Image (cartoon, rainbow, N blue to C red):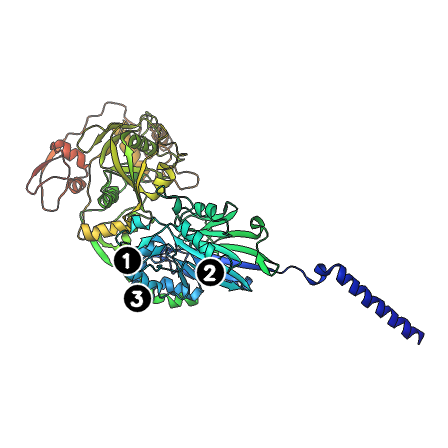
Amino acid sequence: MFRKFKSNKWVSWLIALFMILSLVTPFNVLAAEKTVDIQILATSDTHGKFVPYEYATNSESKSGSMTQIATAVKQLKKANPNTIIVDAGDVIQDNSASLFLNEEIHPMVLAMNEIGYDTWTLGNHEFNYGIPTLDKISSQFKGTVLCGNVYRQDGTRLGQPYKIIEKSDVKVGIIGMTTPNITKWDAENLKDCKVTDPVEETKKVISEIKDKVDVIVAVVHMAEGEEYGNKSSSAIALAKECPELAAIVAAHEHKAVEGAVYNNTLLVENKNLAQTMSKIDIKLTKKDGKYIINDKSKDVKSKIIWMMDGKTKEVNYESDKDLEEKLDSYHKLALDDANQIIGELKGGDLVPKDEVKGIPTSQIQETPMINLINEVQMYYTKADVSAAAAFRSDANMKEGKIKKSDASLIYKYDNTIYLLEVTGKQLKDYMEWSASYYNTYKPGDLTISFNEKIRGYQYDMFSGIKYEIDISKDPGNRIVNLRKMNDSPVKDTDTFKLVVNNYRASSQLLNPKSEIFKDGSLPKVIEKDAVSATPIRDLIGKYIKEVKKGVLTPKMNNNWRITGNNWDAQKRSQVVKLINGDKIKIPQSEDGRTPNVASVTEKDLENFIISKPEDKKPIDKKPIKKPENKKIIYTVKKGDCLYLIGKKYNISYDKIAKANNIKNVNLIFIGQKLVIPVH
């Protein structure tokens, strides 16, 4: 009995102790803080990439696609069910997306619905097809279309200004706005709409919803920095003016931005064509019955998720096969379109066969290929001067039928057009920068070679201007005899409309750190992403089909050439034969990316003769009798041009022009008698 009494006594003491502790430290035991982690997955500028295929090049492309995004979303959503999926615009343009505007459901919208997107903010390219088409396609989306700063004539917004989404008792407000510069690019389509300041509209929405939500995120089709001097087009301005925002999903510039911070607000942006997806993690803590962010610098984090590793080219997320199957009919339709015949190239290839194996003809002389690219750029922008590069050493379009996708054979990338205003001095500085691609010619050189530190895509060739490149001079002093097409000299104070691709404009010509312009000045921007931001390769196909009516012929402008390479003609001929016979190799850069990085010299020729006496006899140092010139009289026929006539007799067109005193190499007539100077 005593033991029972003692046991009960201890129980009483323990109960009393527990009650005392509960009064002294109630929060440690009973009121631990509750936290919720919200995961926001964001895409933007997906531009019609619904499956891993690039229809412009007619090739598989696993760098990103909506079907790969689907795989990534499934994995990340499984890890955190408190997931919100958003898109920041430019969904239904590019990669043949315009083929599906009249389908029952657009493949990009179908993909977003299947993945489970909650919101879609309209981007500038959504307005390319007009408001009725946009209304039709946006109505197919099962989530909420956001566009809070574009109003119809009746005063209603084109899209909702915000969407409140609840996850585990946490209310998240998603605000959607688009760049106000849509009035520059699609003025005609927006003539019945009013486009307002997205920053001011965001402020209004914040005032409206701040007491209804626990956290606010802006998903906007606005660049990180401002465009055309319009501060309200900048996501940075949004961060500075709206400190209530926990994070901003920006878009439009096609660049990956991971965790930039402005005014203590996180900002992310995605690479285009579904190459990336941004993940924003927001930790909220419940205090006094409300969820709050304790510290934005610690509780709001981001990560850029790549569909493919850019360095190793290893695919991080494979395509979701179920979604691929649902999109297969669209894929087949786009393939048929890519393979349709849009014209025919008559009269030869756009790039002649390389005279010297391993030295690309397209980078050492004028070719119809670069002329065509420049012609297209000038046609659609009305520019005075155009510049373009040969992106690949083997870039060419062969004589014969032209498929729609064949434009990618001469223009690989999806660059858009920039129209700039430059002075004569700025133009020459730019041309000098480009001409530094060549190694300086030295006595004894028998081939032209390239600077190992400069990639071929950095070398531009120009149309709309006449010039010579004297490679015997040092870089910076090579452009000589610079003239307008009417042969008048270019003055420093002259002004020109110059058209280039967006990469050249943004990375070099408009970059104050590039040091192209000796006086520190920069060109003026007339228009960014001109021609409704249509990729140049698409414009090439459009030009062939619509302007040239499907018939393309090689065209030479005779506006530039390389000079200063005063080599020995006979030794040059010997070296060319040895190179083409694989007896002498043209050196490449160590990484293999730049061909022809050193000239073959007379010394190389002598060394070969000494080491291979059985292959070659010693060079005869005696004076060599020049071969007798012969003259052939040729009568011009229908379809002829100097380029093709020269090709027939293995002689350059400019020699024919000189022999016949022809000033305009593109102007010959049927029945004209031409002297063909041949050896």
Counting residues from the N terminus, which is met first, the one under dot 3 or under dot 2?
Answer: 2
Q: Quadrant of residue 157?
A: bottom left
Q: Given the current orientation, which residue lies at the most extreme top position? A: 622
Depth order, front residue of 213/449: 213
Q: Is 154 on the left-hand or right-hand side of 206? A: left
Image quarter of the C terminus = top left
Depth order, front residue of 156/604: 156
Q: Callout 3 environment at 10 Å: few (<14), some (14 to 19), or many (20+)?
A: few
Q: Which residue is mark 1?
A: 130
Q: Quadrant of residue 564?
A: top left
The total of numbered circles placed on residues is: 3
**What type is the residue that disc 2 sits on?**
Ile
Relative to 203, does residue 508 appear above or below in the rendering? above
Q: Given the current orientation, which residue lies at the most extreme right position? A: 2
Q: Is 57 on the left-hand or right-hand side of 665? A: right
Relative to 470, does residue 130 appear above or below in the rendering? below
Relative to 674, does residue 63 appear above or below in the rendering? below
Depth order, front residue of 289/328: 289
Q: Are marks 3 and 2 in contact (CB under 8 Å)?
A: no
**What type is the residue that disc 1 sits on?**
Gly
Q: Which residue is mark 2?
A: 85
- Residue 41, which numbered label? none
Residue 229 placement (x, y as % from top left):
36, 41
Q: Separation of disc 1 and disc 3 at Cα? A: 16 Å
Q: Which residue is mark 3?
A: 103
Q: Is 147 on the left-hand or right-hand side of 486? A: right
Q: Separation of disc 1 and disc 2 at Cα? A: 27 Å
Residue 151 placement (x, y as % from top left):
33, 57
Q: Separation of disc 3 and disc 2 at Cα? A: 25 Å
Residue 551 placement (x, y as % from top left):
17, 51
